[in-house]
Amino acid sequence: MYLKVWSLPEPESILKESAEWAFINSRPVYSLSEVMGDARAVQLLMSLAEKYAAEIRRFSPSAAYIGSSRGEIALLVQGIRSWEGTGKVSPTLSPETSMGTLASQVARYLGITGSAATISQTCLSGLSALHMAALHVRAGEGRCVLFGAVDAPLTPFFVETMAALRIYTRETTPPYVRPGHVTSKNTFALGEGAVLGLLSSERFSPFKLVQIRLHTAPVRHGVSFTAVDTEALTALLSQMEGEKPDFVLLHAPGTAQGDAAEWEAVYRVWGDIPVLSIKRFIGHTLGAAPLLSLSAALFLLQTRKWVSMPYATFWKGSLSPVRWREVIVIGLGYGGVMGALRIQYEP
């Protein structure tokens, strides 16, 4: 199967030091616009759908699978406040905050009349959506499928829910997020983003989806619900068929323990290898994060422009890819969910 991807931010911006940082509750967030909230998730998705509608319709996708961890959280918070203040809510609150409408609104706009499903599986949501698209194509249900992901969690309420985990960055100058930093400090920060893509059984791009696997870590003593299980991730990565990839796009959101646990699994399977996390540039976009990493990975394969971290990391920061043919992208989420995919570049 072959795929192509469009994203917000665009791939060349995902790996670039940006001025798109704002502050909520004095905490840094990566924002694509000065407008935060108010049906922001569907706005981001529809902006991509409108921009690339002609190309998407040309391939006549038979279904749409969209991943989102939180959906329209800003609208939901507004609705709760309205209820608490006045005892009334808007008649549009229920349909606008139903997760399923993210996929159906995009599908209806693009003329997709088959299945339209929103998949919510924490920060693995986007990867889960691509997995569903792959199953759809493999089952012979359609030649081409639309997949994607979106999260727009930049509200004061949600920023504080993440800060309550004691992982939010306290850095006052960029980079606010420092994945893999050799320190005990957490440097997590939120961002927003959206991705749409097409997956087809026919070759219509140079990017081949060689493999995609999902896994749920078993309950293990000493490993919390929110932690990265190194043993489980090692087992998953060991099942990725093929030779050692040329580089890896990590989940690594800037949490000291999580980044170290993820790198340990990668090192056990492949040893020293060039790795990168896009969280340094755009923060953690929750369910959209795995597909934004995929967008960045495809850009790197095409341009061969590697980006190094400007600080000491767990891994050898001086390493850069020698060959530019295969990449593995990792996604992780609460509750031990994890996934990985392998892309092969065939120009």
Image (cartoon, helix red, strand yellow):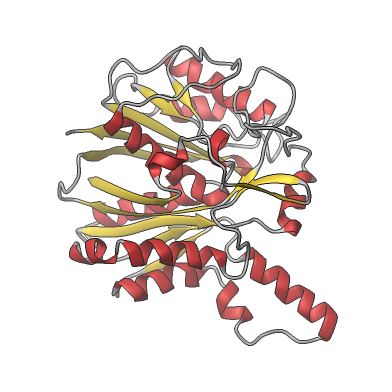
Q: Quadrant of residue 59?
A: bottom left
Quadrant containing the N terminus is top left
Q: Is residue 244 left or right of residue 151?
A: left
Location of residue 58 in the rendering, given as x and y in whole percent from the top left corner: 18, 64
Q: Is residue 185 left or right of residue 336?
A: right
Location of residue 126 in the rendering, given as x and y in whole percent from the top left corner: 46, 50
| Residue sitting at x 52%, y 29% | 233
Question: Can residue 163 be spotted in the picture?
Answer: yes
Towards the viewer: 79 or 44:
44
- Judged from this view, the residue extending furthest toward the front is 19
Location of residue 176 in the rendering, given as x and y in whole percent from the top left corner: 66, 34
Towards the viewer: 50 or 322:
50
Q: Is residue 207 left or right of residue 90?
A: left
Q: Quadrant of residue 256?
A: top right
Question: Can residue 213 be spotted in the picture?
Answer: no
Quadrant containing the C terminus is top left
When the figure is inspected, residue 33 is found, relative to residue 124, above or below; the finding is: below
Towards the viewer: 152 or 210:
152
| Residue sitting at x 56%, y 72% | 98
Location of residue 117 in the rendering, given as x and y in whole percent from the top left corner: 43, 66
When the figure is inspected, residue 274 is found, relative to residue 293, above or below; the finding is: above
Towards the viewer: 6 or 229:
6
Q: Is residue 179 left or right of residue 8?
A: right
